[in-house]
Image (cartoon, rainbow, N blue to C red):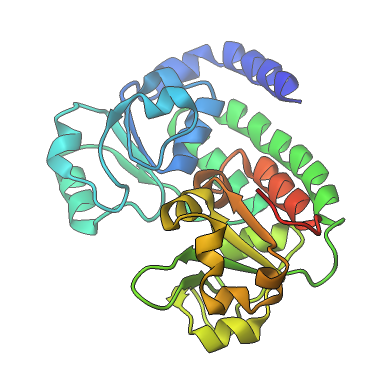
Amino acid sequence: MRFLTAFLLSAVLLASGDARAAGPQRIVSAGGDITEIIYQLGAGDRVIAVDSTSTFPAEAAGKEQIGYIRRLAAEGILSLQPDLLIAAHDAGPPPAVEQLKAAGLRVELAPKGDSLAGVQQKIRFVGDVLAMPEAAGTLAEQLETDMQGASEVARAVPENTRVIFVLNTRDGAPLVAGAGTAADAIIGLSGGVNAVTGFEGYKPMSQEAIISAAPDVLLMMSQTLDRIGGIDAMLARPEFSLTPAGKNRRFVAMDGILMLTFGPRLPEAVRELATALTKTEQSD
């Protein structure tokens, strides 16, 4: 499927060479989803710098770094002499973004999108900004086809599999994902049910509330699990060990960028999480 996608995109790019040449040539990209889209469209050679969340593909991670997407420094970006900053919707801080605009830099912020339709919208947005609408259309259509296969895997997840996403466990109460988060969205797309109800965003949750939520599966970024010392350290905490997930050692650790970015690899993320949720044993 990837070879087919690459072939189709190559054909479109050859047919739209003039449009490509007319697009921005020195691009700073902020946001892992945006950077992945740029590379999937075949314009990675025009990227001169990326933010710290742009770790895929490997070629992107090797570019000049501009720091974290929400802590951008206008002076550093301007020193690179770009002709475009294209970024995710939450790029900031706002004064830095305004300073870049005031300096005459073209700044484009992509729409938020934690769904298939949202990712397709981001792809078409990037395609328009880079003067590559045909390539973007092809990629958006291929994404929908790939998601159909991933959704088949998600349908095999046992009904009402309750999942709790733990962002971190520092500073007291664990920080977990409520409604309206990327974690909540990926859980739903992958056939699970968010065990956290009653609030939106990422918020601390008490020991009693986590036990009462009774998650069947603990979901974490692999980076988080490594940082806290592994699953045994996680299950040393009673708020997790006393849940069905803790008692059965059912946990899933995934790469955070893949899981929460909502870019062109969304079908891969859904397939990986759904496959893990169908298992009755622990996930490594």
Percent of width and height locating residue 78: 16, 34
Residue 228, placed above or below residue 171:
above
Residue 259, placed above or below residue 38:
below
Q: Is residue 198 left or right of residue 25?
A: right
> Which residue is found at the position 70% from the left and 63% from the top?
188
* Figure quadrant of the N terminus: top right
Q: Is residue 204 left or right of residue 104?
A: right
Location of residue 124 (image quadrant): top right
> Which residue is found at the position 41% from the left and 48% from the top?
88
Q: Is residue 158 left or right of residue 233?
A: right
Percent of width and height locating residue 35: 45, 35
Tally of numbered tags: 0
Residue 182 in sight here: no
Q: Is residue 94 left or right of residue 219?
A: left
Residue 131 in sight here: yes
Percent of width and height locating residue 2: 71, 24
> Which residue is found at the position 16% from the left and 43% from the top?
74
Residue 241, placed above or below residue 100:
below
User: In front here: 32 or 170?
Assistant: 170
Percent of width and height locating residue 240: 58, 74
User: In front here: 131 or 37?
Assistant: 37
